[in-house]
Amino acid sequence: KTADADLLEAMQRRSTALVEEFIPKGVSNLMWALAKMGEQPHEDLLEGMQWRAHALAGDFKPQEIASFVWAVATMRAQLYEDVLDEMLPQALLVAGDFKPQEISSLMWALVTMGKRPHRDLLEAMQLRATALAGGFIPQGVSSLMWALASMGIKPDADLLEAMQKRAMALAGDFKPQEAANLLWAHACFGVSPDGAAPSFFESMAAGILADGFERLNVSERSQIHQFLLSCALEPAWKEHALPESVRRIQADHGEDLRLTFLQAAVHPSRLQRQVAKSLRTLFKGLDVSEEVHEARSGYSIDVRVER
């Protein structure tokens, strides 16, 4: 063990012993720090910090809520339902004080843990994000839109337009992963050529081309394939020309993207697994598969049922 490892071990033991003396900021900061270092807390410390968060949830501020929930999600740890039941109502109470990074961090974390906030909190976060759109950085725009899409929620028109305009203003600063996440999210929302959408799609696609396709990993290529497929299936684009850079991606890389998508490992969501399990239970003898890639079309089928 290195000296750093020994110190970390000692700090975890000491924190566990003093858990009842932690204030909200201390709980949040400790969990955030461990997550940033890629460290898994001891089981006793994780449990103690969660129950301390539960006891103090009414005193948590937006940054402390977002950092705590983000840390647990990043650690891939299990967040107790009782803690979430106290933390999310507190988030709603202080929703008007959330900052852009705190909104995107909280939403990303909830999706990563397979949690869906109540409608009131979703609406509050969307309203707050719309009001603060000018303060979002590329990662925040991408994370928020990805989170909403992953929950199957289309943002209201004001938020969608605000995030599109913010993304266009920052287009040169987007990393390939952020741009790919954003295009994939719009494939889920719908890719009709309304409002700022064509200019937005052009700016994201142009940025991806400028960065070079060799920098895209399998996941990002698969996301772009799904975006292109959504454009091909959208009737409104038959009356409008696709943005130039989108057409270039389709012409120069479309087939490679399709093949990459078909060969990519599949990762069914928790909801897909639950639906498939229910179908297998209800209808014995059916062949039920989750997240199937259809080779000829390149479609992704959430759940396929065959006799």
Image (cartoon, helix red, strand yellow):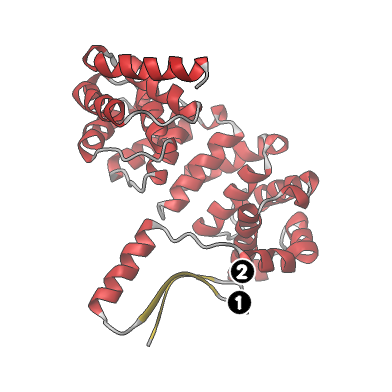
The correct choice, above or below, for 115 with respect to 125 in the image is below
Label located before the other in sequence (1 or 2): 2
Closer to us: 19 or 247: 19
Judged left or right of residue 52, residue 182 is: right
Query: Going by the picture, which residue comes out furthest to the front?
Result: 1
Kindly identify the residue that appears in the image at 32 percent across and 67 percent down. Answer: 275
> Quadrant of the image for the C terminus?
bottom left
Q: Give the residue displayed 56% in from the left and 72% down from the top.
A: 299
Specify whether 206 is left or right of 25. right
Secondary element type, mark 1? loop
Mark 1 vs mark 2, CA separation in Å: 6 Å
Marking on residue 295: 1
Judge left or right: residue 244 versus residue 188: right
Q: Amino acid at mark 2?
A: Leu
On the question of residue 100 being in view, the answer is no
- Where is residue 219 shown, x and y percent of the image? 60, 54
Left or right, 36 with reference to 96: right
Q: Amino acid at mark 1?
A: Ala
Q: Are marks 1 and 2 in contact (CB under 8 Å)?
A: yes
The spot of residue 4 in percent (x, y) is 51, 16
Examine the image and state in which quarter residue 16 appears: top left
| Residue identified by numbered label 2 | 262
Residue at 67% over, 35% down: 169
Is any part of residue 261 visible from this angle?
A: yes
* Image spot of residue 89 (x, y percent): 24, 33
Task: Measuring from the top left, give residue 192's x and y in whole percent.
Answer: 58, 60
**Above or below, comparing residue 132 to residue 176 in the picture:** above
Structural crowding at the residue carrying mark 2, measured as other residues with C-alpha within 10 Å and reported as few (<14), some (14–19) or many (≥20): many
